[in-house]
Amino acid sequence: MTPAVPTPRLPVTVELTRTFKTGLALVPLVLGLVLAAVSPFAHEWLDDQIGISGPFGLVERMPKVWRYLVLGGAGLVVGLLMVDDVTKNAGVVVVHDDHLEVGQGEPQRWVARRAVGAAFRDGTHLVLLGRHGEMLARVSVEDLPGDDLSAALTAAGYPWREGGDPFAAEYRSWLDGSPELSAEQHALLRRRAEAENPETEAALDPDLREHGLVVRPGPKGRLEWRPARRP
């Protein structure tokens, strides 16, 4: 008899791992300690080569213990600031049995489970499409572990597509003013192309859906679009 696969305990949050954050914080710390160790040699080499030791001269004159404390401490501070910045901009996906919460840094959009027709990765983004192919959400998940994301959604019964966008062949490059789109659609696409952050882009999704459009970034940053399917 095949053993039953245990149902995941929900909600499941997919976000930056503790290992990733720790590693990111430690890199500048290690570099600071290395700099403290090599500063006497760097000071001597620069002085011999060009007669100027620059900041290495100041570091080399510190007592050895203070060299390590100052440079190591500075590296740790830089590392913690890097972690804070990356965490604020990294994607987060919270998987519930009846909905998903997605966003950058923290959940900002609520998507009902019954509305999701397809979930997949498109490059560095998680894309959620509705049952008629309409765009529900597009969130950057570049730093999230891909296996964890697909496993969480699949185990919870969401329609994960390992092969990517089922409508990929329908996209075309947007050419401003082309006759296949109306003036209102072109105006919306201009606003979408000029959006400066993910929040502004997401705010335009309802208007794009209302005007029968689904968009995505194409090669070299060019906008691509396809017609939204109707029920």
Image: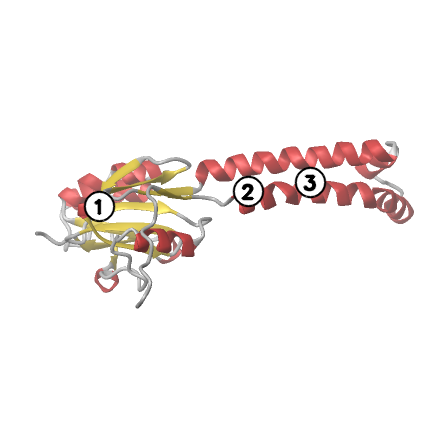
Q: Where is residue 62 in the image (x, y as percent from the top left)?
A: 86, 32
- What x and y, as percent, mark residue 224? 27, 54
Q: What residue sits 38% from the left and 52% below the top?
A: 149
Q: Tag 2's secondary structure? A: helix
Q: Name the residue under label 2.
A: 21
Q: Is residue 230 visible?
A: yes
**Residue topped by disc 1:** 113
- Pick the residue in front: 19 or 137: 19
Disc 3/disc 2 C-alpha distance (Å): 13 Å
Quarter of the image for residue 39 reads top right
Which residue: 85% across, 40% down?
A: 53
Residue contact between numbered discs 3 and 1, judged by CB atoms under 8 Å: no
Q: Nearer the viewer, mark 3 or mark 1?
A: 1
For image coordinates 33% across by 54% down, the residue present is 6
Q: Which amino acid does label 2 sit on?
A: Lys
As drawn, the residue found furthest toward the left would be 231
Question: Where is residue 96 shown, x and y percent of the image?
Answer: 29, 42
Which residue is identified by label 3?
29
Q: Which quadrant of the structure image shows residue 133?
A: bottom left
Amino acid residing under circle 1? Arg
Against 204, is 164 above or below? below
First in residue order: circle 1 vs circle 2: 2
Q: How far apart are marks 1 and 2 (CA)?
A: 30 Å
Q: Is residue 225 above or below residue 25?
A: below
Picture coordinates of residue 92 (x, y %)? Answer: 39, 42
Density class for disc 2 (Cα within 10 Å; few <14, some 14-19, many ≥20) is some
Evaluate whether residue 58 shows in this view: no
For residue 202, side relative to residue 39 (left or right): left
